[in-house]
């Protein structure tokens, strides 16, 4: 009840009616404190009738969401969004045409992750989600480092500079498929050799594009600014996912 009363919706409703009470009290010389008390009691009595349930989360209870990702960060973010989902495994070779732009590549890779799935074998209320994130510096796509030496080279490239992070997202059902992407720009302060060495040895970012995790130590001490979504840099454009879920479920 306290959360509802403190909500912007409730407060605006109360203030709007309080203005009416003030006018009534002025015209009829009625104690305004008593009118406000009556109004407040009325709203508290009827507040339970107001539906504060998020309509998308309510709608998604009728769907089964399958996430095609091994990333613990994407799982964490989807849980933070209040989404119930299961993991589905797909293995694909992430090959692409080198002439493609980074925007084309990241969207293609997100679609590619769902390509082994025969969606017609699933119920129509199944939603498939796949995402791919790339780091781009000097117009070159930086993948995951194969060892610590390559991770150090990647961090040296990013140190003291601005680079781009793109996440491609595909949300699909057996009837419909949507693909889009989001872009963020990340600026690192100048990193010392000691800082980069500490991070690589302690955190071993060999499973991360560009050899860093924005949510980890290197992000806390090294990132100067982010233009765009933080969660996109983390590996999932959460706002875009929300909008795409609305679209495939007919809520948009």
Image: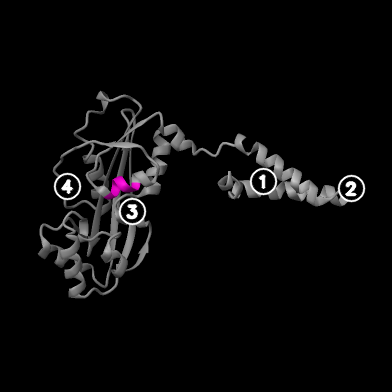
Mark closest to the chain's N terminus, 1 or 3: 1
Q: Give the range drawn in magenta.
A: 73-77
Give the residue displayed 41% in from the left and 33% down from the top. 60
Q: Quadrant of residue 88?
A: top left
Give the residue displayed 38% in from the left and 58% down from the top. 228
Q: Position of residue 19 (x, y in %)?
A: 76, 50
Horizontally, residue 142 falls left or right of residue 18, namely left
Q: In which quarter of the image is the N terminus?
A: top right
Residue holding disc 4: 96
Mark closest to the chain's N terminus, 4 or 1: 1
Give the residue displayed 37% in from the left and 56% down from the top. 229
Residue holding disc 3: 232
Residue holding disc 2: 28
In-front residue for pair 252/48: 48
Q: Does the residue at mark 4 contact the one at mark 2 (Cβ under 8 Å)?
A: no
Q: Distance between the residues labelled 3 and 4?
A: 22 Å
Q: How far apart are marks 1 and 3 (CA)?
A: 36 Å
């Amino acid at each position: 009840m306290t959360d509802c009363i403190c909500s912007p919706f409730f407060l605006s409703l109360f203030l709007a009616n309080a203005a009416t009470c003030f006018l009534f009290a002025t015209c009829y010389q009625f104690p305004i404190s008593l009118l406000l008390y009556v109004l407040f009691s009325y709203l508290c009595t009827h507040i339970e009738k107001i539906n504060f349930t998020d309509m998308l989360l309510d709608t998604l209870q009728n769907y089964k969401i399958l996430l095609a990702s091994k990333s613990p960060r994407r799982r964490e973010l989807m849980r933070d969004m209040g989404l119930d989902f299961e993991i589905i495994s797909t293995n694909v070779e992430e090959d692409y045409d080198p002439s493609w732009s980074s925007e084309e590549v990241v969207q293609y890779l997100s679609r590619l992750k769902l390509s082994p799935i025969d969606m017609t074998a699933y119920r129509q209320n199944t939603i498939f989600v796949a995402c791919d994130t790339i780091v781009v510096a000097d117009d070159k796509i930086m993948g995951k480092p194969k060892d610590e030496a390559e991770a150090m080279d990647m961090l040296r490239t990013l140190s003291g500079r601005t680079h781009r992070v793109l996440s491609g997202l595909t949300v699909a059902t057996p009837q419909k498929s949507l693909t889009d992407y989001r872009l963020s720009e990340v600026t690192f302060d100048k990193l010392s050799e000691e800082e980069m060495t500490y991070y690589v040895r302690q955190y071993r970012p060999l499973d991360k594009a560009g050899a860093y995790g924005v949510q980890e130590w290197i992000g806390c001490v090294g990132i100067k600014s982010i233009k765009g979504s933080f969660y996109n840099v983390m590996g999932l454009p959460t706002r875009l996912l929300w909008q795409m879920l609305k679209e495939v479920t007919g809520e948009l």
